[in-house]
Amino acid sequence: MANPLIALVGRPNVGKSTFFNKVAGRKISITEDRPGVTRDRLYTDATWRGKNFTMVDTGGIELKSEDIMWKEIVKQAEVAIETADVILFFTDVREGLLPSDYDVADILRRSKKPVVLVVNKIDEYSPEKVFEFYSLGLGEPFAVSSEHSQGIGDVLDEAISYFPEGTEETVPSLKIAVVGKPNAGKSSLVNKMLGKERSIVTPIAGTTRDAIDTLFERDGKYYTIIDTAGIRKKKNVDDNVEYYSNMRAFDAVRRSDVCLLVVDSEEGLTEQDVKIIGYVHEQGKPSVILMNKWDLIEKDTFTTNRFEEKLKEDLKFMDYYKSIYISAKTGQRVSKILEAAEEVYAHANFRVPTGELNDLIGDAVRMQEPPSYLGRRMKVYFSSQVSVCPPVFALFVNDEGLLHFSYARYLENTIRRAYDFSGTPIKIVVREKKDED
């Protein structure tokens, strides 16, 4: 199961993003002294007193505004409230209670979720400063100063006390999100993989509205498959239900271990497919592209090759992709999907021994030196793989500004030729280490 989710909500400019950055330990949310800076939901994983959780920062809620941007921000915040296990409701002691605070409080009461009331921007605590906030009817206010890191621990203590019991998964399973456009055959595929009619399947696009998790066992291994609604183009999302469906699908990608990217072979790879695949790539998730409805394609000896050439052309940004040509309707090659998911997940978890990596990068640098810039050339002192899922390789260099995109690509290709990272993105980062010469 996913980590418990803590959502930070409130009207604009009450200090949610500052709190978020303090807990995250780094500046993720942009913080400025004006409302509306945080428009989208931002996530970070964190730990407090041994409890792991995910925290989401949201844009400020302005319910009475007719501005289109504010309406989009409110939608984002409502999705966060809907999916959260605990809500931190931020208010501002300097401005006091405003009508919009009561509006947000009404939403939170209707959500039936645990709410921790945070009174922010208190430089020096005194009981009378927070007394008026009891009128919100959300229990005891917690006085904090996010900017000065005061009271944050008390808020987190209260938040984790509401975590649902048994949040640790009793049966470890590989979490697989099935994503794609509407009517690409996702639900039919899930039903075929599970061997039962678990999702409603109709030829009408958009039947599946929620991301639905199903735990199942196959050959002694456990999997959680997450069936999602079809992800529509933004301009085609014309009501709240569709909007929420898209957001839940993106959330499913975020909490998955592996993504199955379902493409309608009859339509071929479309611009929307590429955008969805690109989102999975940006999230650093291993994936398998499933060219579905392959039984409906008229074939000759070169049909698969033509499709592969199209994939290579359109997916230049992720030439590590792994594809399978399937039919959810007939079951053609569906049996290969779990094996492929396990394979790309293993690749995402693979660690290159540090000695081997340094030899590999050293040879690559000697074969092709980094390009010079204003008479300076990047020197690589040391290399190390610093994380997995996705694999991240750190280069310790003399000047991090000297790594050109094309050279990073050259080093990535060098690593991929030496080790099998098919199906998973890898990242190369640079860390500056002063030249001791």
Image (cartoon, helix red, strand yellow):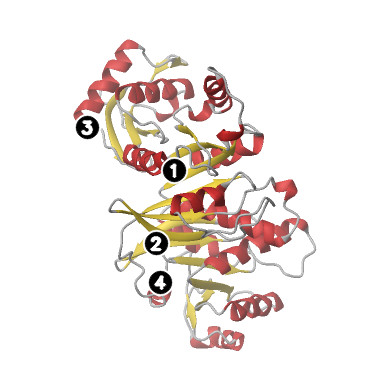
User: Which is closer to the viewer, label 4 or label 3?
Assistant: 3
How far is the residue under mark 1 from the one under mark 3?
23 Å
Residue under numbered circle 1? 285
* Secondary structure found at label 2: loop
* Secondary structure found at label 3: helix
Q: Is residue 71 above or below residue 414?
A: below
Residue under numbered circle 4? 156
Say whether residue 6 is left or right of residue 70. left
Residue 380 spot, x, y in % from top left: 31, 24
Q: Amino acid at mark 1?
A: Lys
User: Which is closer to the viewer, label 1 or label 4?
Assistant: 1
Q: Is residue 198 above or below residue 376?
A: below
Residues at marks 1 and 4 touching, judged by CB atoms closer than 8 Å: no
The answer to which image quadrant residue 164 occupies is: bottom left
Work out whether residue 179 can be spotted.
yes
Q: Earlier in the sequence, mark 4 or mark 2?
A: 2
Q: Earlier in the sequence, mark 2 or mark 1?
A: 2
Say whether residue 417 is left or right of residue 176. left
Residue 1: numbered disc: 2
How far is the residue under mark 3 from the one under mark 2?
32 Å
How far is the residue under mark 1 from the one under mark 4?
29 Å
Residue extending furthest toward the front: 330
Q: Earlier in the sequence, mark 4 or mark 3?
A: 4
Residue 354: numbered disc: 3
Residue 199 spot, x, y in % from top left: 55, 59
